[in-house]
Image (tube, rainbow, N blue to C red):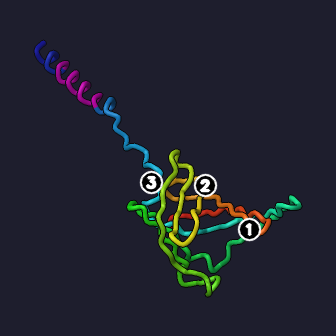
Amino acid sequence: MKKYAVFLALGLSLGFTSCTKCDDDTTAPEPTRTELLTSHDWRIISRMTTTSNNATGSSSTTNSYQSCDADDFIQFQASGTFKYNDGTFLCEPTFIHAFTAVWTLNTNETKIQINRSNNPLNELEILELTAEKLVVKTSRTEQGYTYTSIETYMQP
């Protein structure tokens, strides 16, 4: 009878200790948008641009991504520094090929604001953000035309 009591006690103690792992569900918290943005460089893989004529209301969409864009990247640093680099394949030799700026997220973390001292504030609306993919929308108006671009970036 003592043998059965010992086996019963041993079985119950193993049962209780194995269940403590079941109850201890400690999953890592989801990364914040800042953590996702600053985890690595982002390399552009596509850019679609819609041009709208504000006077006539007509518009057209084109793939404005070029093969020379393939090595372009952006970087968001945790310190608030934003870096842009054209890489070695240049689309426009006369353009600025690299610059730094200051970046912040707006209050509800749906827009990235990039501010360069010699350029007005640029705003990127976040359409999608995961550990591997960033999709943003930008808009600007010049001389009666509105240009809206959807850019997709991936982890290199």
Q: Is residue 41 left or right of residue 49?
A: left
Q: Are there few (<14), some (14-19), or many (20+) residues within 10 Å of tag 1?
A: few
Residue 83 location in percent, x, y?
Answer: 48, 70
Report whether 10 appears left or right of 128.
Answer: left
Tell whether label 1 touches label 2 (CB within 8 Å). Answer: no
Q: Quadrant of the N terminus?
A: top left
Q: Percent x, y for residue 81?
A: 43, 65
In the image, taking residue 36 as reference, residue 49 lies left or right, namely right
Badge 1 amino acid: Glu
Circle 2: element type: strand
- For image coordinates 50% across by 75% down, the residue present is 99
Find numbered disc 3 in the image and state the secondary structure of the residue it sits on.
helix
23 lies above or below 132: above
Q: Which residue is drawn at 86% across and 61% down?
A: 55
Q: Which disc number belongs to residue 34?
A: 3
Residue linked to disc 2: 125
Q: Is residue 88 magenta?
A: no
Task: Please name which of the two marks, 2 or 1, marks the residue nearer to the observer.
Answer: 1
In magenta, the rendered stretch is 8-20
Q: Mark 1 points at which residue?
A: 142
Spatial CA span between label 2 and label 1: 19 Å
